[in-house]
Amino acid sequence: MRIVPDRPAALQITSVFGGFFLGPYLALRMSMHFTPGSELVQTTSVLGFALVFVGGTLVWTGLGIAAVVLRAFRSLLRGRLPGSDLPIRADDRIVPPGYGSYVVLGLLAGAGVGSTAAVASELTWAAALALWTAAGLGYGLLLWAAARHGYLPFHEPD
């Protein structure tokens, strides 16, 4: 688990909305440029890249909760209180593991949209796959970095 400084709420909200809309918007613009007139590729791009954000957040939440529970159980087995070994201050935030899911889903979504673009357009298979996979990887890495450094908040139950 990483400990990062707590980010301002306005910056986190901007990161969430920016992260959610940036990827699908850029994927749509890329589809309009490389496959003009192909509504199938444009729709697949928007939905696929939105899935990276939403799916990555859900997977990160699941993996993060599982990691916290396992860490607490391990601490109890060792005879310590859960969380007692974390050097956290009041203005810090814990970032649980699992945010690598953004990169994996970015690669998968990029490859899926690239495959659709190869079938539904005049692009070659290699070119379409390379373009959209690179875009998916870039988007996944951007979300990964934002989550790793505390700009995308981990959803905590209240």
Image (tube, rainbow, N blue to C red):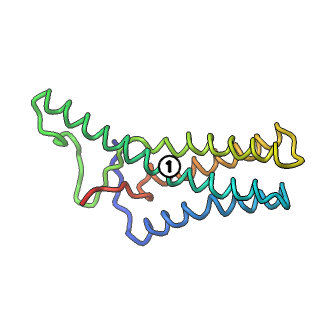
| Residue at 77 percent of width and 57 percent of height | 31
| Residue at 70 percent of width and 58 percent of height | 43
| Residue at 74 percent of width and 44 percent of height | 114
Residue indicated by mark 1: 55
> Camera-side residue: 108 or 9?
108
| Residue at 69 percent of width and 53 percent of height | 44
For residue 37, which quarter of the picture? bottom right
Q: Is residue 103 above or below residue 7?
A: above
Q: Count residues near mark 1 (Cα–Cα under 10 Å), then give few for <14, some for 14-19, many for 20+.
A: some
**Outermost residue toward the top?**
78
x then y, percent, for residue 104? 56, 39
For residue 99, which quarter of the picture? top left
For residue 7, which quarter of the picture? bottom left
**Outermost residue toward the right?**
122
Q: Report the quarter where the C terminus lies.
A: bottom left
> Camera-side residue: 47 or 108?
47
x then y, percent, for residue 100? 49, 41
Q: Callout 1: helix, strand or loop?
A: helix
Q: Amino acid at mark 1?
A: Gly
**Outermost residue toward the left?**
79
- Position of 56 compared to 32: left or right? left
- Position of 155 compared to 25: left or right? left
Q: Is residue 86 above or below residue 43?
A: above
Q: Report the quarter where the N terminus lies.
A: top left
- Position of 83 compared to 145: left or right? left
